[in-house]
Image (spheres, rainbow, N blue to C red):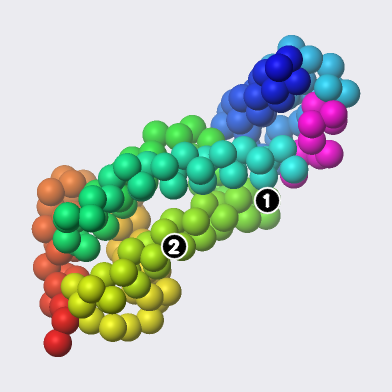
Amino acid sequence: MKTIDRRQQVMDSAEKSFALFGYKATTMEQVARLANVGKGTIYTFFENKEELFDEILRSIIADMKQITEQTVNEENSFLDNVHQSMDSLLEYREEHELLIKLFQEVNEFGTPQAKEGLQKVEKAILEYLERQVSRAMELQQIRKDDPKLVSFVLLKLYVMLTSDWNKTHPSMHKDQIKAFVGVFLQKGLSPA
């Protein structure tokens, strides 16, 4: 039982360090200090910083998966489920300090590991969306098309409207985004 607690303690401390300093500036020494363990203890659980970072990302992706599973309701329309899921995921992303720091690090320094980490998170979101899009196509709620492409466009549309748009325009409220996306998608994705 102690081993599991120590491992989690190391992961929590590493996540805190990555959130504060970014991937590039985080060292195993910092993680050991924050976790109040010897550096050797970390290496009993993780071979290196990359492996520790990957484990934290897996945990974040699992959290995001759980969030989406809780928001999807089979009784709701495809668009309602997508909006609820994307809203929850983007809210999680905006509130999660590590993800915020990774975005900053990629924008400021282009750190390859931070970029790769964000790509893993985006891939997980896209895989989820693709399943939802494919299901909606099977149910003829939306027209048949390439689910990967539709998922990509959906994700980018939500990201653009929730974060990129408000860099140069007044922020849109969730309901405005939902209304816009709904009309935008219904015109282009409605069944024949």
Q: Secondary structure at mark 1?
A: helix
Residue depicted at 53% across the width and 36% down the height: 98
Viewer-side residue, 86 vs 113: 86
Tell me how far mark 2 sits from mark 1, CA to CA.
Answer: 20 Å
Amino acid marked by disc 2: Leu
Residue 188 in view here: no
Q: Secondary structure at mark 2?
A: helix
Residue 91 in view here: yes
Image disc number at residue 126: 2
Of badges 2 and 1, nearer the viewer stands 2
Amino acid marked by disc 1: Gln
Q: What segment carries the magenta color?
A: 42-50
Q: Classify residue 144 by image quadrant.
A: bottom left
Q: Specify the quadrant that holds the C terminus.
A: bottom left
Q: Residue furthest right?
A: 40
User: Which residue bears the numbered disc 1?
Assistant: 113
- Classified by dominant secondary structure, the portion drawn in magenta counts as helix
Residue 167 position within the rendered picture, expressed as x and y whole percent measured from the top left: 31, 50
Q: Specify the quadrant that holds the N terminus.
A: top right
Residue 142 position within the rendered picture, expressed as x and y whole percent measured from the top left: 21, 76
Q: Residue furthest bottom?
A: 192
Task: Examine the structure image and report whether residue 45 is included in the region drawn in magenta.
Answer: yes
Image check: 68 left or right of 18? left
